[in-house]
Image: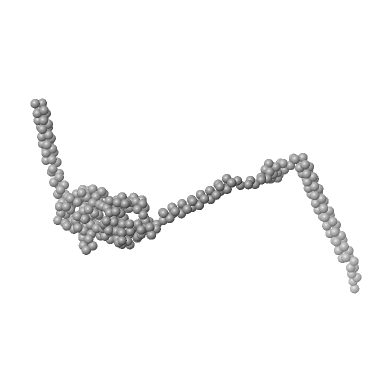
Amino acid sequence: MYNIDTSRPLAGLQTHTNTVVCFLKMHSDASNFQLNSHLSTLASIHKIYHTLHRLNLTEDVSPETHGTACCSKAMPPRKKRRPTAGDDLSAKKSRQDNVYRKQETLQIQEAEAFSSKRCLEWFYEYAGCDDVVGPEGMEKFCEDIGVEPENVVMLVLAWKLDAQSMGYFTLQEWLKGMGLLQCDSTEKLRNSLDYLRSVLNEATSFKLIYRYAFDFAREKDQRSLDLNTAKCMLGLLLGKTWPLFPVFNQFLEQSKYKVINKDQWCNVLEFSRTINLDLSNYDEDGAWPVLLDEFVEWYKDREMSLRQLPHTHHHQVEINSNNHHDNNDRNSLETNI
């Protein structure tokens, strides 16, 4: 049997315990020392600050505190001023002005906005009791907007209204077309005339108006356009833009044609846009209508004849000039006598 001495482990444990207690005591003493040191430093700072504050030397210590202190000293609390009778009148007038401005703005907006009712009343100024503006109403309408009935802008307006008969605007055409133009008064339409003229400068729109003009101008029971009407419409549409139009118009006057069909009508526009003024690029074997083949042939014969005229014409001018001088000489002689 072995004798076990149990006092040694207990003695070791006691020794360790004493060591830990000593360590904790030393750490606590160190912490307390540091804390006491900090508290002492803060107390000193606090004491110094109060001393400076009493001496009014703390202005640079805190900018925010300085700003607040200055403002509080320089800006004493203001007393509220009681409104006078003049102030009451000014405020009342200002409120009234605001109300008037709002009313004027609403009136302007209402005037600028399109009104179907106003457009309808405008239509019956020219239609009277009928549902169509006829020749008499159309004449007054053109006079009011300052445009001649034969002006090309009236054709553009008719195209915009999709009018089916020349010289007539139905109620349905009027309301639909004027609605698209946002015009419900004479003044608004006058202001839109420049826009209607500008539409002619757009190649696609011009082509549509040109095609529309044929059906618009022809008699509804006829498939072709009579020659006189065709010449007027061609002059309206091409007279100012196609240099050869006067010559083409002269050709039509001396030709055998009494009417122009739609194929001929459309090809005249194509001809005016693609063929040179000297007709040098015209293809006689092309798909042009006979009307234009005959025009080209007539034009070339005419040019040949004109080339032979200058000498004769110049000789005739010289004869006339000599006769004029002879007459002057004779008159001078008679005067001297």
Vertical placement of residue 319 versus 117, above or below: above
Looking at the image, can residue 41 be seen? no
> Left or right: 136 with respect to 80?
left
Q: Position of residue 255 (x, y in %)?
A: 15, 54
> Left or right: 12 with respect to 318?
right
Q: Quadrant of the N terminus?
A: bottom right
Taking the spot 78% from the left edge, 44% from the top edge, the residue there is 50
Front one among 261 and 189:
189
> Left or right: 205 with respect to 99?
left
Q: Position of residue 75 (x, y in %)?
A: 67, 43
Taking the spot 80% from the left edge, 51% from the top edge, the residue there is 35
Say which quarter of the image contains residue 335. Answer: top left
Front one among 151 and 3:
151
Front one among 329 and 79:
79
Say which quarter of the image contains residue 221. Answer: bottom left
Q: Position of residue 124 (x, y in %)?
A: 33, 59
Taking the spot 22% from the left edge, 50% from the top edge, the residue there is 245
Could you tell me how many numbered marks the image carries?
Answer: 0
Front one among 8 and 275:
275
